[in-house]
């Protein structure tokens, strides 16, 4: 599952192209603006998570909490 804003953007762009969709078409399907989708694909860090989730939903994905590879000394934060 993509985790960073740049990884999410690259994932969306790759899947959009594989689906042969333009940014405008995907934006309309997801219910977001074309400008937002462009910023998402470029990895802009300030995009709104609800809209990111709406776009990922088109490809059967969603934003979620995932474990990182980092381990803490006592196992807690």
Image: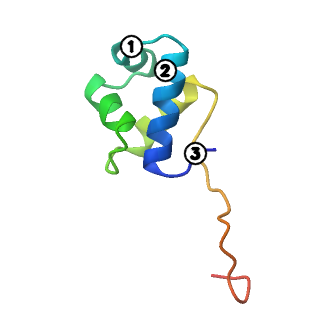
72 up-or-down from 56: above or below? below
Work out whether mark 3 precedes mark 1 in sequence or the reverse, and give the earlier one. Answer: 3
Q: Position of residue 24 (x, y in %)?
A: 33, 15
Residue that numbered label 2 is attached to: 16
73 up-or-down from 63: above or below? below
The answer to whether the residues at label 3 and label 2 have Cβ atoms under 8 Å apart is no
Q: Which mark is residue 41?
A: none
Local crowd size for mark 3, using a 10 Å CA cut-off: few (<14), some (14–19), many (≥20): some
Q: Residue furthest right?
A: 75
| Residue drawn at 39 percent across, 13 percent down | 22
Q: Quadrant of the C terminus?
A: bottom right
SS at mark 3? loop
Q: Residue furthest left?
A: 35
Work out whether mark 3 precedes mark 2 in sequence or the reverse, and give the earlier one. Answer: 3
| Residue drawn at 73 percent across, 82 percent down | 75
Q: Quadrant of the N terminus?
A: top right
Q: Position of residue 65 (x, y in %)?
A: 62, 56
Residue that numbered label 1 is attached to: 22
Query: Mark 1 to mark 2: distance in Å?
Result: 7 Å
Judge left or right: residue 76 versus residue 58: right
Residue that numbered label 3 is attached to: 2
Q: Position of residue 16 (x, y in %)?
A: 49, 20
The answer to whether the residues at label 1 and label 2 have Cβ atoms under 8 Å apart is yes
């Amino acid at each position: 599952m993509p985790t960073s804003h740049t990884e999410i953007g690259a994932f969306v762009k790759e899947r959009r192209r594989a689906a042969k969709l333009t940014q405008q078409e995907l934006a309309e399907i997801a219910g977001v603006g074309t400008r937002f989708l462009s910023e998402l694909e470029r990895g802009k860090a300030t995009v709104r998570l609800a809209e990111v989730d709406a776009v990922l939903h088109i490809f059967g994905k969603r934003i979620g909490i995932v474990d990182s590879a980092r381990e803490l000394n006592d196992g807690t934060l």
